[in-house]
């Protein structure tokens, strides 16, 4: 029997066409499913924009819900060449005058000259940082006999170095400063009595008057290391003004001025050293690292005054100006001083040229003096004005940012739920979420927040600060009203940031923050298959994706069923073709035999 190689060949029927049409009927549901899938994919795509815009609105609201987002200040100086001013965002608005009397300076001094390339010799240089008290124009010292009778302790000695007081040529040891004048006075008295012994001079400390009194049986005098009244005074660097302990630097016999300078710079003594050559001789230039009186320094040594290394000694307190001579004609000195200024006429000082802490949140950088002949009878003040004012820029920007984020989301949701004219179809067409109750509810929630009330501020509604709700649900800003509100102290800030502990009456930034976090929450109750508490936006996105997944599964099921039907029909029609082929062959054989029989019997 001949083999049937194609469906319908044996039977003569259009079996392939019949099967194709029957399978097409089975696949008919795919058209609707594919159309639904396309719609779902479109909805998922556009709803992604909704999620992003809800998140953006939430971020803006969270940022401006903080009181710090609303505070800013503008600071100005009427003479920035003399002083500049900066503030923190919480500084109170204010205005004040400033006199810059004196700028903070570093102490600087130069040594006496040495032969170029000379090696001053071995020994030790000992540095100490501390405060000097400086007045006048020159520095000279006197050892004139002085009586202490009736002298107040606070008037002359907050600290005493060795040699400040001598009795019959015997110096009193150094006495460090204490918190109270009484303690200092007691130490002075005890020290004097310890030195005088049997000399007949007795010191007592009167705790009522705060003075050291002397009684002398033999007329012996007490000698103080004081300065002439018209001279520059260098009385500090005792314990009261000490900033650092002594820093000792070992100098070897082979050290030059350059190597000594290098050793000083690496010793951490608070002093910068420079080797200097004037074209013939070497000098050592020394300068304190910092400004202010406490950055002053002295230099002592263990070498004899005749040593070349002694030319680096600078110790006016102890009358040791060997190389850096006492009158500083050959080795000029500049003593470190504090900055001095007057704010509204009130004196302030600073170790640097920056004033902080005088007015909360205000930092003033002193650049140049405004007072001429400061401290003299010819003093002339030329005060400048410093102003701190509220900056409303952040408040206006915050409102604008919130309105922008809100309008963007409102426009997206309005478009997605509307009927819009289609130019191609020449008719109004429903948009992806037209009639979708969950998406429409988002619009209602947003507009409900806009129209709600906030308690605790002068204004209670957004409309009162210039935010108007339009017919399309968008917000517009009345700039004139907003400007007035922004300049009304912190009232507008409170309208947005007040936390009353009640979501219904909190500030509007908190309301939108709460709304956004709720919409984007990880779960919402009442939606089948979702976790309790999931937000509306998140739930909607999850539902759309779930519907798309179910659609894909349904399409696969239809396709699989159609494939099974096609297989079954093909098998059946193939069997029918075989049977029909056999019958046809038999019929042909019978016909041949009848024909042959008829011929034989004719």
Image (cartoon, grey):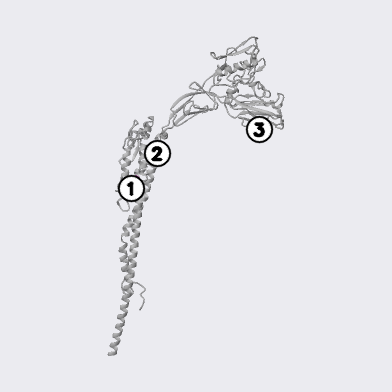
Q: Which residue is mark 3?
A: 263
Pointer 2 local density, CA inside 10 Å: few below 14, some 14–19, many at least 20: some
Q: Quadrant of residue 253?
A: top right
Above-or-below relation of 593 to 468: below
Q: Are marks 3 and 2 in contact (CB under 8 Å)?
A: no
Viewer-nearest of discs 1 and 3: 3
Classify residue 25 as left or right of residue 373: left
Classify residue 84 as left or right of residue 172: left
Q: Which residue is mark 1?
A: 416
Q: Which residues lie in the magenta part?
A: 529-540
Q: Quadrant of residue 474?
A: top left
Q: Which mark is residue 247?
A: none
Pick the front one: 569 or 372: 569
Viewer-nearest of discs 3 and 2: 3
- Quarter of the rendering occupied by the C terminus: bottom left
Tell me the element at label 1.
Answer: helix
């Amino acid at each position: 029997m001949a083999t049937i190689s194609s469906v319908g060949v044996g039977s003569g029927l259009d079996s392939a066409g019949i099967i194709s049409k029957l399978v097409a009927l089975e696949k008919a549901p795919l058209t609707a499913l594919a159309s639904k899938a396309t719609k779902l994919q479109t909805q998922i795509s556009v709803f992604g924009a909704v999620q992003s815009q809800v998140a953006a609105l939430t971020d803006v609201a969270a940022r401006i819900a903080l009181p710090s987002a609303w505070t800013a200040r503008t600071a100005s100086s009427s003479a920035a060449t003399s002083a500049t001013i900066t503030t923190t965002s919480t500084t109170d608005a204010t205005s004040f005058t400033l006199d810059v009397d004196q700028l903070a300076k570093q102490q600087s001094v130069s040594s006496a000259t040495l032969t170029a390339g000379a090696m001053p010799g071995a020994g030790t240089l000992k540095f100490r940082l501390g405060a000097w008290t400086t007045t006048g124009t020159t520095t000279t010292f006197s050892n004139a006999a002085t009586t202490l009778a009736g002298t107040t302790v606070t008037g002359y000695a907050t600290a005493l170095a060795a040699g400040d007081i001598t009795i019959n040529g015997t110096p009193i040891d150094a006495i460090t400063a204490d918190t109270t004048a009484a303690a200092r006075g007691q130490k002075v008295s005890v020290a004097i009595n310890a030195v005088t012994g049997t000399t007949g001079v007795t010191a007592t400390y009167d705790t009522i008057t705060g003075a050291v009194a002397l009684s002398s049986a033999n007329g012996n005098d007490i000698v103080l290391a004081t300065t002439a009244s018209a001279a520059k005074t260098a009385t500090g660097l005792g314990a009261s003004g000490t900033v650092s302990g002594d820093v000792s630097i070992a100098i070897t016999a082979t050290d030059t001025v350059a190597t000594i300078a290098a050793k000083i710079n690496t010793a951490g003594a608070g002093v910068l050293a420079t080797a200097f050559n004037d074209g013939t001789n070497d000098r050592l230039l020394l300068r304190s690292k910092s400004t202010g009186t406490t950055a002053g320094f002295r230099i002592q040594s263990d070498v004899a005054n005749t040593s070349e290394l002694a030319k680096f000694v600078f110790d006016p307190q102890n009358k040791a100006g060997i190389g850096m001579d006492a009158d500083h004609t050959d080795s000029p000195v500049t003593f470190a001083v504090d900055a001095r200024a007057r704010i509204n006429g009130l004196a302030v000082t600073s170790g640097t040229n920056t004033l902080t802490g005088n007015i909360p949140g205000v930092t003033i950088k002193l650049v140049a003096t405004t007072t001429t002949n400061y401290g003299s009878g010819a003093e002339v003040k030329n005060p400048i004005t410093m102003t701190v004012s509220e900056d409303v820029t952040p408040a206006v920007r915050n409102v604008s940012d919130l309105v922008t984020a809100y309008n963007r989301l409102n426009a997206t949701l309005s478009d997605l739920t509307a009927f819009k004219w289609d130019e191609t179809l020449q008719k109004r067409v429903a948009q992806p979420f037209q009639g979708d109750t969950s998406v429409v509810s988002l619009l209602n929630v947003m507009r409900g927040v806009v129209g709600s009330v906030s308690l605790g501020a002068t204004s209670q509604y957004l409309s009162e600060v210039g935010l108007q709700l339009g017919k399309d649900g968008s917000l517009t800003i009345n700039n004139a009203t907003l400007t007035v509100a922004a300049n009304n102290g912190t009232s507008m800030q409170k309208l947005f940031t007040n936390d009353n502990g009640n979501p219904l009456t909190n500030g509007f930034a908190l309301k939108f923050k709460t709304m956004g976090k709720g919409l984007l929450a990880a779960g919402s109750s009442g939606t089948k298959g979702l976790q309790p508490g999931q937000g509306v936006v998140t739930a909607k996105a999850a539902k759309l994706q779930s519907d798309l997944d179910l659609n894909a599964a349904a399409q696969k099921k239809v396709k699989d069923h159609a494939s099974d039907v096609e297989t079954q029909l093909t098998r059946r029609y193939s069997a029918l073709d075989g049977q029909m082929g056999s019958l046809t062959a038999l019929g042909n054989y019978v016909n041949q035999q009848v024909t042959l029989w008829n011929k034989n019997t004719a």
